[in-house]
Image: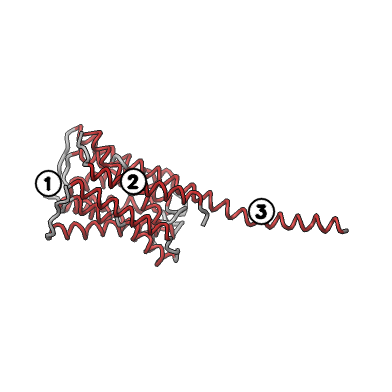
């Protein structure tokens, strides 16, 4: 009898241990999937800047072509992977928010690049992890990770050093600069809200919402542009590659990552594009980055490498 009791106690202890272990294993598996998707999406996005430069289009025509082509690509992706319940979930507030975020993200970035110094715009966009962390706290009730906040601050500092190095530190505080900073912050807010809502609502067909938003942004550009540019074949190939392949595949992957890890984490990893993009430009059109840009980029990459290593080991 005593032996049977001991065996029973051991079995109960083993069952309890396995019950506790399963959620931890599942959580770690989800985090691994999310981090992998986010890194893949961010790396896929890194040559985007190069092909934007090769297209030689102005801000509104860039928005028109990228928005239209990517919108069609998003729609095809949605048709391929759609769920039978998707159409019943489009009449929701969350679907409308994602559409609005996509319009804001695409339109504000293109307009900002067209009227303001690129440096100021990129500094504004670099705040996206901060917005994502705050929105996750307010909307999802997720605790603000000290590790994420510290990494975000260091990444913003590194990007600040990097982008200032691109303009030799010469930025004038004028109306265009203030507008550019405001539009950059608007882009950061749109991205942070987009990832947060996708994490909140697992049933919303976000790929379809992004498609609608991208096409709406293209229509807006067509209305605002004084003339529509028809690029020659080499430039058309560049804008088609980023609009049909790079932008939709990377953004869909990043958005799926937001379902497995906090939106602030996805936003941080997404900033790899800001650092590695100039290296693609350097390789593609021989536009060498300055020493300051390389130092700032090194700070960002080091911080993200440490952050991802720690995140991969953590199960919290």
* Distance between mark 2 and mark 1 Cα atoms: 34 Å
- Give left or right: position of 237 versus 304: left
Depth check, mark 2 against mark 1: the one in front is 2
Residue at label 1? 227
Taking the spot 65% from the left edge, 56% from the top edge, the residue there is 19
Kindly indicate whether the residue at mark 3 contacts the one at mark 2 (C-beta within 8 angstroms).
no
Q: Is residue 53 above or below residue 306?
A: above
Depth check, mark 3 against mark 1: the one in front is 3
On residue 18, the disc is 3
Q: Residues within 10 Å of mark 3 (few under 14, many from 20)?
A: few
Q: In this rendered view, identify the residue nearer to me: 45 or 243.
A: 45
- Give left or right: position of 153 versus 232: right
Taking the spot 11% from the left edge, 49% from the top edge, the residue there is 226
Q: Residues within 10 Å of mark 1 (few under 14, many from 20)?
A: few
Q: Position of residue 131 (x, y in %)?
A: 33, 61
Q: Residues within 10 Å of mark 2 (few under 14, many from 20)?
A: many
Q: Is residue 213 above or below residue 278?
A: below
Q: Position of residue 57 (x, y in %)?
A: 17, 42
Residue at label 2? 272
SS of the residue at dot 2?
helix
- Give left or right: position of 200 versus 67: right
SS of the residue at dot 1?
loop
Mark 2 or mark 3: whose residue is earlier in sequence:
3
* Distance between mark 3 and mark 1 Cα atoms: 65 Å
């Amino acid at each position: 009898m005593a032996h049977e009791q001991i065996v029973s106690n051991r079995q109960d202890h083993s069952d309890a241990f396995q019950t506790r272990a399963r959620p931890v294993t599942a959580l770690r598996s989800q985090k691994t999937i999310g981090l992998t998707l986010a890194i893949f999406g961010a790396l896929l996005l890194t040559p985007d800047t190069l092909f934007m430069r090769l297209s030689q289009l102005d801000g509104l025509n860039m928005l028109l072509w990228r928005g239209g082509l990517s919108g069609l690509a998003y729609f095809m992706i949605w048709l391929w992977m759609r769920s039978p319940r998707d159409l019943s979930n489009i009449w929701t507030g969350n679907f409308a928010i994602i559409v609005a975020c996509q319009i804001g993200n695409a339109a504000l970035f293109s307009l900002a690049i067209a009227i303001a110094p690129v440096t100021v715009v990129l500094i504004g966009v670099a705040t996206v992890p901060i917005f994502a962390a705050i929105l996750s706290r307010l909307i999802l009730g997720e605790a603000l990770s000290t590790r994420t906040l510290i990494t975000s601050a260091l990444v913003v500092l590194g990007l600040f050093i990097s982008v200032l190095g691109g303009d030799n530190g010469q930025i004038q505080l004028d109306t265009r600069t203030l507008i550019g900073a405001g539009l950059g912050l608007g882009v950061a807010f749109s991205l942070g809200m987009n990832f947060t809502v996708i994490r909140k609502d697992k049933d919303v067909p976000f790929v379809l919402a992004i498609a609608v938003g991208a096409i709406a942004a293209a229509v807006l550009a067509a209305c605002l542009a004084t003339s529509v540019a028809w690029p020659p074949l080499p430039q058309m190939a560049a804008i088609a590659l980023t609009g049909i392949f790079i932008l939709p595949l990377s953004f869909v992957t990043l958005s799926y990552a937001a379902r497995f890890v906090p939106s602030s984490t996805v936003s941080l990893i997404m900033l790899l594009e800001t650092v590695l993009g100039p290296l693609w430009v350097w390789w593609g059109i021989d536009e060498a980055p300055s020493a300051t840009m390389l130092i700032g980029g090194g700070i960002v990459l080091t911080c993200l490498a440490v952050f991802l290593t720690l995140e991969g080991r953590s199960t919290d």
